[in-house]
Amino acid sequence: MKQSKSKSRMDGSADAFIDQRLASGRVAFPLADLVKETGLSVTAARNQLLRLGNRVTRVSPRQQFFLIVSPEHRAVGAPPVAWWLHDYFQWLGHSYYLALQSAASSLGSNPQALQVTQVMTRVPRRSLEIGRIRVHFFVKRTLEQTPTQPLANAFAPLQVSTPEATTFDLIRYAARIGGIGRAAETIAPLLPLMRPAELRRVLKIEDEPATAQRLGFVLENLKATSLAKVVQDWLPSDLVLVPLLPGLRGDAPEIKRWRILNNAVEFGR
């Protein structure tokens, strides 16, 4: 009889655990937390989660990390990425930050609706597909040195690259996010947020003259004269001629100030 009562109390453990998580403002958890806080075995915990159906979903079939799917998010299949990304990377034990167009969008630049969330990591990771949500990862060796800031008024903790770091990344990864024209379009609304001293700091950290040359050219074309001057003042005197679009040269004209081959139709080639 005692065993039956104990089993009855344990049967709703996962359900109660999820309610407690939601009450504390969290929408994600690793299986290990459920096991630890409820006393369930790993097998029993998994079975209870299976019985919850579409109330929970796994981030990946290979990972024991779960998301709580409230009724308002059932059509999408998961809660917003910004609500659980920080918890996910804490569980992984890796650094990250919201990057590129996703970072720009969080800072107020929304030239086009994004279909994916873009995240910077230090090591390669497979993209995540959870319901209709897509998360793409980009690799950056200087991740830990890149200036970031917490996202203001966010539902959950979230690290985002600063406007200056976001702008540099947009140029560096332009070929993977729709081209240099798309990068410039995304940068334009960020210009009022950018600070010369912080841009100088990013240039020093990244130490990539070729990317800085492209950035300076784009800033100048966006009429951000003071920011373009920061880039020009940082650049070494012995610049190597680089194409605006990496890999494509042809008969593109040279922009001598930046030692750029303007091979992009978006900038009047």
Image: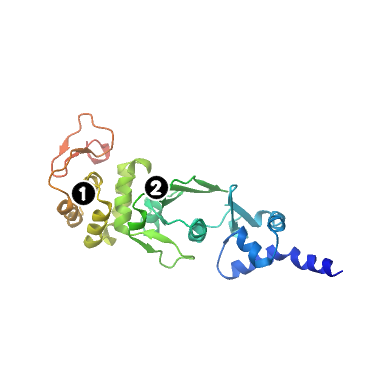
Give residue 42's quadrant in the image. Answer: bottom right
Secondary structure beneath label 1: helix
Q: Quadrant of the N terminus?
A: bottom right
Which residue position holds label 2? 139
Residue 115 visible here:
no
Task: Write down the quadrant of residue 214 in the picture.
Answer: top left
247 w.r.t. 133: above or below: above
* 269 up-or-down from 82: above or below: above
What amino acid type is highlighted by mark number 1?
Answer: Gly
Q: Residue at x 24, y 50 (%)?
A: 207
Q: Horizontally, is 134 left or right of 218 in the view?
A: right
User: In x, y percent, where is residue 215?
Assistant: 24, 48
Q: As shown in the figure, which amino acid type bears the numbered disc 2?
A: Val
Q: Which residue is mark 1?
A: 216
Which of the pair 202/263 is nearer the observer? 202
For the residue carrying disc 2, how many other residues have a C-alpha within 10 Å: few (<14), some (14-19), or many (20+)?
Answer: some
